[in-house]
Amino acid sequence: MTHTDYSRTGPPPSPWVGMVLLAGVTLLLTGGFEVIEGVVMLVRDDLAQATADALAIPVNFTFWGWVQLIFGTVSVLAGIGVLYGKFWARIIAIVIGMFSAFSNMVMLPAYPFWCAIIIALNVLCIYAVAAHGREIRA
């Protein structure tokens, strides 16, 4: 029976790798939340706590539903890529995190608690991926 050594060549990963993994999983979760939020806005726009006129950018909820649905889908795909250690996924994760945080700031009057949670998670993901994303390898 032979023994194969699968040791890594190079320095050991820092403890921040866990933070990047958390960012990948958080991207999956926030993307899933945004997909759900987008579907809810498309199907039941009467559930919002404010009218479309009270939003920072006054457009109807159907438009924001599609925006949330698209951002959520791209966020889920970027989260999968971050977990696999792909460079393109880190770039997309930072960009989609910025756009997602902005879109949730616009929607803050309609869904205050929900949007505040999504914004906080996006900021956490942006920091972890930007500062320590290169430390993760598939």
Image (spheres, rainbow, N blue to C red):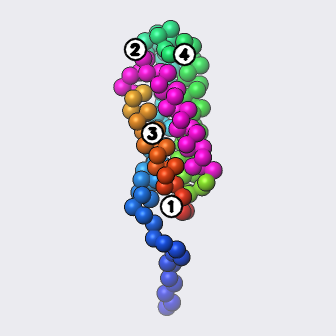
Please give the range of residues in magenta: 88-114
Quote the CA–CA distance across marks 1 and 4: 39 Å
The crowd level at tag 3 (other Cα within 10 Å; few <14, some 14-19, many 20+) is some
Please report the residue visible at 51 percent of the width from the left and 90 percent of the height from the top: 2
Give the mark nearer the N terminus: 4 vs 2. 2
Q: In terms of secondary structure, where does tag 2 sit?
A: loop
The answer to whether residue 25 is above or below residue 65 is below
In this rendering, the answer to whether 60 lies above or below 134 is: above
Whether tag 1 and tag 3 are in contact, CB under 8 A, the answer is no
Which residue has dot 4 on it? 57
Q: Residues within 10 Å of mark 1 (few under 14, many from 20)?
A: some
Residue 90 falls within the magenta-colored stretch: yes
**Residue 111 position within the rendered picture, expressed as x and y whole percent measured from the top left:** 41, 21
In the picture, the quarter occupied by the C terminus is: bottom right
- On residue 123, the disc is 3
Query: Residue tagged by mark 2?
Result: 49
Amino acid under label 4? Ile
